[in-house]
Amino acid sequence: MSDLTVKPWKRHGKDRLYVNLPDGTTVAWADRVTKAVTIKVENHRDAALSLIRKHLGEGITVTPSGRSEAARTPRSVPGVRPPVRPAPARRPSRPASLPPLSPSEDLAGNRPGARLLGMIAERGPSAGERLWAKVLRQPSEWDSWYTGLEGERRVGRELARLSAFGWRVLHGIEKSNGGDIDHLLIGPGGVLSINTKNHQGASVWIGDTMARVNGRKPEPYAAASKAEADYVRGVLERYCGFPVPVEPALVFVGVTSLQRAATQFTVRVYQEREVAALGPLSGKLTPEQVERVHAVARHRRVWLKN
């Protein structure tokens, strides 16, 4: 048990504890709100549960590993009560009214990487600081911002090509929790909430919830993408008045290899040049619905009220 560590993780509306091996491999994770525990490595089940109980107390529920979360059924554990599943939220019978749309509130004018551009303008380095870091060839705290910006611009160029198929695209949508949606693609094939990851020359493996870049510690890329798609669906359906099909998507830029787990089917995963495959998708939204969804999505303030 002493080899295992517990690491809190809170992002995208999730509040979790991860139990990891020294090499970063996730053995189990627990949702602090529902006390639902997912075991990833069965050999460490007992030790992981013991650690989690120290943090969450009794009343946890264990779900079996090896399947996607959507298909999991809680496993009965002696002395453990099943989680209380909230009733599905009802969609309002009448869509909410859209606020007035002024030019400053219209997201249709956003360029790819708009959110990062704003952050760089507000808190980024001066021209002199950038030049000095370049001369010294020293890494800086802003490197990840510029890397992310380049990735979003490259994916944005690929998405722009899909307009010929009836797709609309928005970029840099600020969310109410302070994060942002890199790209929102709206068209005959539904809505895709797209998260861009720029990993030049890297080898990437993507699973049900986590991803590994060059074999390093897992990152919750897929889990975050699914949470973001749920957020997008909630916002759009509030104002559209009809069900809006939203899928999460991850687009990797500059990677040398991209492997998907056999169980990975809930998140669309592409390299940047594969984005063109989205063009022919159809059958989920009519042209009138596409226009309505786009009209809602371009309102900056609707994303800040959720």
Image: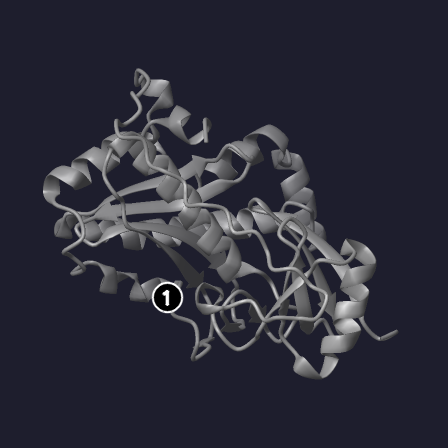
Residue 264 rendering spot, x and y as whole percentages: 43, 72
Q: Is residue 170 above or below residue 295?
A: below
Q: Is residue 181 above or below residue 126?
A: below
Residue 95 rendering spot, x and y as whole percentages: 27, 27
- Residue sitting at x 17%, y 36%: 291
**SS under mark 1:** strand
Q: Please name the amino acid that badge 1 sits on.
A: Tyr
> Is residue 206 at least partly visible in the picture?
yes
- Tell me which corner region of the image, top left, top right, bottom left or bottom right, holds residue 105: top left
> Is residue 112 at least partly visible in the picture?
no
Q: Is residue 86 above or below residue 99?
A: below
Q: Is residue 27 left or right of residue 299?
A: right
Residue marked by disc 1: 270
- From the viewer's side, name the closer residue of 157 and 98: 98
Residue sitting at the far right: 2
- Tell me which corner region of the image, top left, top right, bottom left or bottom right, holds residue 269: bottom left
- From the viewer's side, name the closer residue of 270 and 94: 94
Residue 223 rendering spot, x and y as whole percentages: 52, 58
